Amino acid sequence: MIRVLVADDEPLVVEGIRTVLESAGDITVAATAHNGRDALSAADGVDVALLDLNMPGLGGLDVLERLGATRALILTSFGDQDNVLAAVQSGAAGFLLKTCAPEELIRAVRAVHDGEAYLSPAVTRQLLHLVRPAAVPRRRDAVQRLSRLAAREREVLELLAEGMPNAEIARRAHMSEATVKTYVSRILAKLECDNRVQAALLARDART
């Protein structure tokens, strides 16, 4: 069973998420919280923490920075762009819109539990449109870093930059998901990026 913490300041949202996740059969909501401090207290022993960014007291970003090894999936809305950018830098494992379909929520929790970052395509597009065009030095840095990649790695990066999950990248690039995971890990290492969103933004900077 995948043990999940659901933290959101709206009780109805928490119970709705519980209903969706536990319908999957392989996921259980092991803990819930309605503020950041309770989320931290309840995080021990869970596999995935599903965090709202806007909670009273400690916000989702504060909780994220203190979670340690627990993998965090961030629940966000279209009004949270600045916080999403900060969460990227803090190493969140995934980003999901609150308006997502139940199937996407389940898929995201499974992906993060399996060690794969999950980026909602809508969130990725939001981030790519948010970031201003890169200044010349920033573009030069991005181009220089991308030059470290082989042609096949560049192809995978471009698909990743469109917000595609590994399964879709595998289909488009005609390779297995396991191979995609290997490529993504190699790409992040070569680009010196902590997560997929940083790599996607770097790819955008190089094109600007």
Image (cartoon, helix red, strand yellow):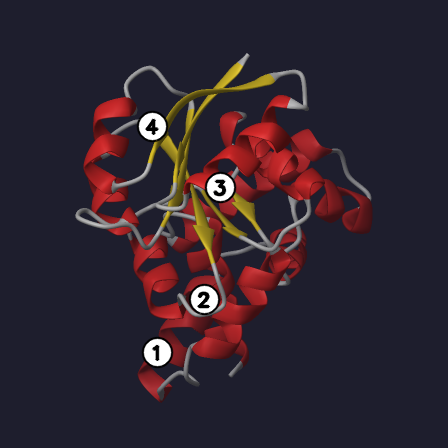
Residue that badge 4 annotates: 70
As measured in the structure, the alpha-carbon distance from the residue carrying label 3 to the one carrying label 1 is 44 Å
Judging depth in this view, the residue of 76 and 92 nearest the camera is 76
Few, some or many C-alpha atoms within 10 Å of disc 1 (few <14, some 14-19, many ≥20)? some
Q: Nearer the viewer, mark 3 or mark 2?
A: 3
**What mark, if any, has residue 138 been given in the picture?**
1
From the top left corner, tell me how far across and down residue 10 is, in percent.
Answer: 40, 46
Q: Nearer the viewer, mark 4 or mark 1?
A: 4
Looking at the image, do the residues carrying marks 4 and 1 touch, with CB atoms under 8 Å apart? no
Q: Earlier in the sequence, mark 3 or mark 1?
A: 3
Q: Nearer the viewer, mark 4 or mark 3?
A: 3
- Which residue shows up at 58% across the image and 33% down it? 111
Secondary structure of residue under mark 2: helix
As measured in the structure, the alpha-carbon distance from the residue carrying label 4 to the one carrying label 1 is 32 Å
Residue that badge 2 annotates: 202
Q: Nearer the viewer, mark 3 or mark 1?
A: 3
Q: Is residue 159 left or right of residue 196?
A: right
Instruction: Please name the amino acid that badge 2 sits on.
Output: Leu
Few, some or many C-alpha atoms within 10 Å of disc 4 (few <14, some 14-19, many ≥20)? some
Q: Is residue 67 left or right of residue 193?
A: left
Q: Is residue 206 visible?
A: no
- Which residue shows up at 65% across the image and 53% down it? 156
